[in-house]
Image (cartoon, coloured by chain):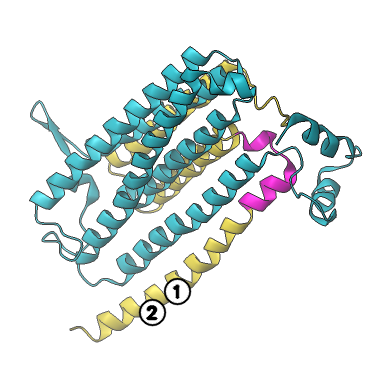
Chain colours: A cyan, B yellow
Amino acid sequence: MTDSTAQQQGTSDPPRSGWQRVVDDWSADRQTFPRVSWGKTMMWIFLLSDTFVFGLLLVGYMAVRLTTPQPWPDTSEVFALTVAGVELPLLLIAIMTFILITSSGTMAMAVNYGYQRRRGLAAAFMGLTALLGLSFVGMQAFEWTDLIGKGVRPWDNPMGAPQFGAAFFMITGFHGLHVSIGVVLLLIIARRVLRGDYDRSGNYEAVEITGLYWHFVDLVWVFIFAFFYLL
Amino acid sequence: MTTAQGQQHPISLYLQVWGWLFVLSFFSYLVDYNDLQGFWRWSLVLLFMSMKATLIVAVFMHMRWERLSLIYAILVPPLAMLTLILFLAAEGGYISALRAAYPG
């Protein structure tokens, strides 16, 4: 969307209260979210649909965990790491969580530097975000290898309920796929930032939209971390 | 307010949120490390989870500065999940009671 259309749609807004403006926006028989670009609107709508996909995976996990008569494995033991002879519960998952949060922070920096038109810094922080994302996927590969080595399969689990295997591979696999796609997206957009594409178009919003996707991946991990690993 | 210029906020705000996410994640990890069970495990984990989710959506995803109609359009529909959770939890309890009563 160009600046002029944004302003045209914006100027027709009278100063009104929040709820009145919501009603105005939805009933005005025109573009529903004035001043919000189509790119950002569509990313939000995509993320909403993705919320339901992950929501269904987690609710499905709840349903099979509630109904299985076999014992559910203790995740803090399954995902424990032994460091210097001390077994630390859930350590690998904690490290993955901190890495993903750090990558969210670097992404926020990238968006900020993008809007400041400091394209070198913006691209560098996007690259750093992609690197952290890659290390997250690497640790997930390690975790999968570990569990596969222990005999866990999507249909089988020697530690108890076979549904644990199904839920684990499905949920972390789908999340890992999202992280991997995010890394590719980050690298593509970072290249364009570095090339100066957005200096020419005068709009760095693509970086923010990429950031929306990346923060969403982090957001989903917050829920997976709580429901699958901690509870 | 969103403009064509985009979302510009002070870096210190992002750093603060970043710090809080670290602290909250660390607290969640401590819940597991200290092996809390039952009520405290559930309430603390869910509390830290919702605080982290709120921070990410509100600040990192800039939701608190978006137009109100967009905020409602995105945040209200996921509440439908609560109905599904409620139904499947009730059904899950019923099924596991059946499986306990008629094993095999």
Q: Indicate whether A43 appears above or below B85.
A: above
* Tags 1 and 2 touching, CB below 8 Å: yes
Name the residue carrying label 1: B90
Amino acid carrying label 1: it is Ala
Residue B14 is one of the magenta-drawn residues: no
Range drawn in magenta: B62-75
Where is the N terminus of chain B found, in terms of image quarters? top right
Q: Position of residue A153 (x, y in %)?
A: 16, 59
Residue A79 seen in the figure: no
Q: Position of residue A207 (x, y in %)?
A: 53, 29
Q: Which label was assigned to residue B94?
A: 2
Q: Chain of mark 2?
A: B
Separation (CA) of disc 1 from disc 2: 6 Å
Q: What kind of element bears circle 1?
A: helix
Q: Position of residue A115 (x, y in %)?
A: 60, 20
Amino acid carrying label 2: it is Tyr
Q: Position of residue A203 (x, y in %)?
A: 63, 25
